[in-house]
């Protein structure tokens, strides 16, 4: 569903019992995560509260080890909080969720499968009807500029193309929530910029809710409606910054906008030069 170009404000005032119409896509309430290993206990997250309305793009930045991946795993149901609640569309997450899309730092493609068959893996695992799945794969391949490379094996694709295949695979079942954990960290600057532009367009076209973990402040501010800044371990939310840019963003033009510069400078200040990657 196409979105308009105004910035949507999160509706944090929605009453608790108003689901499903107004329930946030993702909600974390007073979440803490403690890991118990044989030599020590680690508090990875503490006091985390976040509401993400449907269709919003939220970026998460913070120093290494502050619990960003842990937060995504909670939303995906791969991990249970030690205390607090994690909800998707108002429903408590109680186990691995199959209705979300997850893009990892590395594309994690099967080397012996073509680009098309790597994307179709999602359909096979979910036992989706073959014909609609094939049609959707064609649409996604066109949307991500992979046409002509459908039959290539992963090693015949560039890093950016491999990430696009991983993105198509994560989007195949049209997940209402897309989780991305540093998906572009391994790409060169130019490819990363192209992937950012593409992700902005895909987000606008699909209307999916996105949680993106990144070490790049500029990537966070270019892509997101709001940027969540986390503190060092035990990770908690220091501040949530509303970027205040229209949904449709030209890359170069955005970099020069005062709202963008203000947001990046502010976040850089919060994180401190030592923990900022760019
Ligand atoms: N399964 C686990 N068992 C024990 N400790 C863990 C486990 N998973 C994560 N941790 C610890 O929790 C903390 C947060 O880890 P997490 O991977 O969420 O950090 P991160 O913010 O994603 O870091 P990075 O930016 O380096 O990816 C770290 O101190 C880590 O050692
Ligand atoms: Mg991580």
Image (cartoon, rainbow, N blue to C red):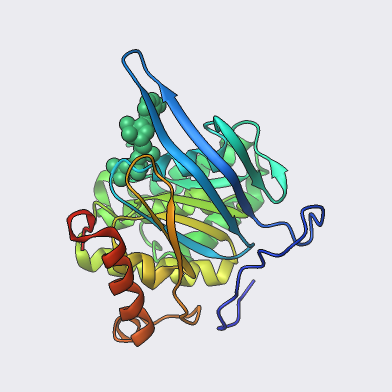
Side of 38 relative to 91 (left or right):
left
Residue 215 occupies which quadrant of the picture? bottom left
Figure quadrant of the C terminus: bottom left
Indicate the quadrant containing the N terminus: top left, top right, bottom left or bottom right: bottom right
Describe residue 61's horizontal placement relative to residue 83 as left or right: left
Q: Position of residue 129 (x, y in %)?
A: 68, 44
Within the displayed image, which quadrant is ligand 1 positioned in? top left
Rendering coords of residue 42 (x, y %):
37, 28
- Whether residue 77 is visible, yes or no, is yes
Q: Position of residue 82 (x, y in %)?
A: 54, 29
In the foreground, 140 or 25: 25
Compared to residue 57, the image places residue 32 above or below, namely: above
Q: Residue at x 64, y 55 (%)?
A: 25
The residue shown at (48%, 80%) is 248
Name above or below for residue 47 compared with residue 149. Answer: above
Is any part of residue 150 visible from this angle? Answer: no
Q: Residue at x 34, y 86 (%)?
A: 257
| Image location of residue 108, percent across then percent down | 36, 39
Quadrant of residue 122 within the rendered picture: top right
- Residue 80, image quadrant: top right
Say if 224 sits above or below 23 in the image: below
Q: Nearer the viewer, residue 197 or 79?
A: 79
């Amino acid at each position: 569903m196409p979105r308009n170009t105004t910035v949507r404000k999160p509706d944090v005032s929605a009453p608790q019992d108003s689901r499903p119409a107004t329930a946030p896509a993702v909600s974390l309430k007073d979440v803490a995560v403690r890991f118990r290993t044989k030599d020590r206990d680690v508090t990875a997250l503490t006091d985390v509260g976040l509401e993400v309305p449907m269709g919003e793009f939220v970026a998460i930045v913070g120093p290494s080890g502050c619990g960003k991946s842990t937060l995504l795993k909670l939303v995906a149901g791969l991990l249970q909080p030690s205390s607090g609640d994690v909800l998707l569309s108002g429903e408590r997450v109680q186990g691995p969720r199959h209705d979300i899309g997850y893009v990892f730092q590395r594309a994690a493609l099967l080397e012996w499968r073509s680009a098309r068959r790597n994307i179709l893996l999602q359909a096979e695992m979910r036992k989706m009807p073959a014909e609609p799945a094939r049609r959707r794969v064609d649409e996604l391949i066109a949307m991500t500029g992979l046409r002509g490379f459908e039959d290539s094996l992963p090693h015949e694709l560039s890093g950016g193309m491999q990430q696009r295949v991983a993105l198509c695979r994560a989007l195949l079942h049209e997940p209402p929530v897309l989780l991305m954990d540093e998906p572009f960290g391994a790409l060169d600057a130019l490819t990363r910029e192209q992937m950012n532009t593409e992700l902005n367009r895909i987000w606008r076209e699909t209307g999916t809710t996105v949680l993106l973990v990144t070490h790049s402040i500029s990537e966070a501010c270019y892509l997101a409606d709001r940027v969540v800044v986390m503190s060092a371990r035990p990770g908690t939310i220091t501040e949530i910054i509303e970027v205040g840019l229209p949904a449709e963003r030209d890359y170069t033009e955005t970099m020069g906008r005062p709202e963008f510069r203000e947001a990046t400078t502010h976040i850089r200040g919060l994180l401190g030069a030592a923990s900022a990657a760019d």
